[in-house]
Structure formats: C-alpha cells, structure tokens
Amino acid sequence: MNKTEETVPVADTPSTRARKTRTAPRSKNKGAPRASAAGDTAPDFSSAGIEDFEIEQAIDAAQDSKLVAVKDILAHSAADPQAKTDALEAILDGASPDDIHMLRRALMRADLPQSPGAHPDDELSPDWRKGGYPYRNLMSRKAYEKQKYRLQVELLKLQAWVKETGQRVVILFEGRDA
C-alpha cells in the first residue's frame, strides 16, 4: 500500500474472506500475459476453493466494470462538467465501500507506460492456422472489461435506434475468449 492511500476498514463477508484466503497473491503476475492453456480455472479444486475463486472473479469483474465506466466518463464527458459530475456521483452512490476504495486507488495511480512491441493479447499461437485456438494468451481482464463495456454502449445505441425506427435486426456474436 502506498503512503498516500488511506486504510479503509473492510467488513468480514464471504467476499472479503475469499480475497484473504486465495492461494496465489494477485500482484504476483499482475499484468503478465497468461497462456491460453491455463484457462480461467480455480487454483484449488475443493468446494471452498472453487467458491472463493468464483466470488473473487465476480468481485474483480464488477470492480473492473465500474473502473472502465468511470474512465470512459472522464474521457468523453469533457464538454459538460455537470454531466460528468452527475454520472460519477451516480456510480459512487451505488458503489460499495470496497468499490469506492478500489476506484480511488486506481484513479490516483498513474497508468504504467505500454512497452513497445505487440500487445500480449494479440499474439497468435503457433498452431492457429491448423484450427487451434488462435491466440497465445488469454485476454487480460482489463482489456476484456474495456471491450465488454464498449460493446454494451454500442448495443444500447442500437437498441434505441431499433425502438425509434421499428426495424428488425439480427445480431451474430463471435467471442474472443468465450
């Protein structure tokens, strides 16, 4: 924890116990690409281990979703400061103390500069031409949440257009790591 970060007390809930009892610390390989063969599997296959893993995954996904939404609001609402303030207040009003603490920490620290070269999410596997899984690494959680948020925004725009015009639409989805 940085010296500038506040210590926020956290309630003893199943989700906080899941974070405390995980087998591998998150910072160990934070940001490192994961081989696609690793998949999204629990490190401990006991009932409690799987439960803790699923709770942790759900918490991470929810927090990443909030973070992507906040960053999008900050990046695209520059013209109207009041709209930006209202949107941020709406997100914070519905956020838990854990989420608020995470958002504060994420917004206070500067993003690390990107290393030159290909992004690990885009590296192709050696057997992609033979019908194997096309990517060498699983998509990072941050990139996944960012893409998911952008897709949701576009789908809401499409929904509004369909309601307005009465048109019929067929949508085909192809997932990256689905």
Image (tube, rainbow, N blue to C red):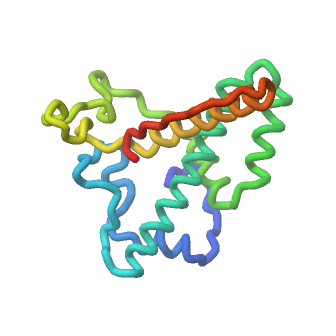
State the residue lying farthest toward the bottom: 47
Locate residue 126 relative to residue 147 in the image: left or right. Answer: left
Please tell me in which quadrant of the rendered image residue 94 appears: bottom right
Toward the top, the furthest residue is 79
Residue 85 vs 66, above or below: the answer is above
State the residue at coordinates (49%, 55%). Answer: 1
- Along the viewing direction, whichever of 3 and 68 lies nearer the viewer: 68
Q: Is residue 145 left or right of residue 178?
A: right
Is residue 166 positioned above or below 48 on the image?
Answer: above
x and y percentages locating residue 67 in the rendered image: 60, 43
- Which of 20 and 140 lies nearest the eye of the viewer? 140
> How many numbered marks are there?
0
Residue 140 coordinates in the image, percent (x, y): 39, 42
- Comparing 141 with 149, the one in front is 149
Locate residue 127: give its quadrant. top left
Q: Is residue 82 left or right of residue 13?
A: right
Give the side of residue 65 with respect to residue 1, left or right.
right
- Percent of width and height locating residue 171: 55, 34
Q: Residue at x 60, y 76 (%)?
A: 13
State the residue at coordinates (61%, 61%): 7
Q: Position of residue 57 (x, y in %)?
A: 47, 60
* Residue at the limit of the structure toward the right, as seen here: 82
Residue shown at the point (51%, 42%) measured from the top left? 145
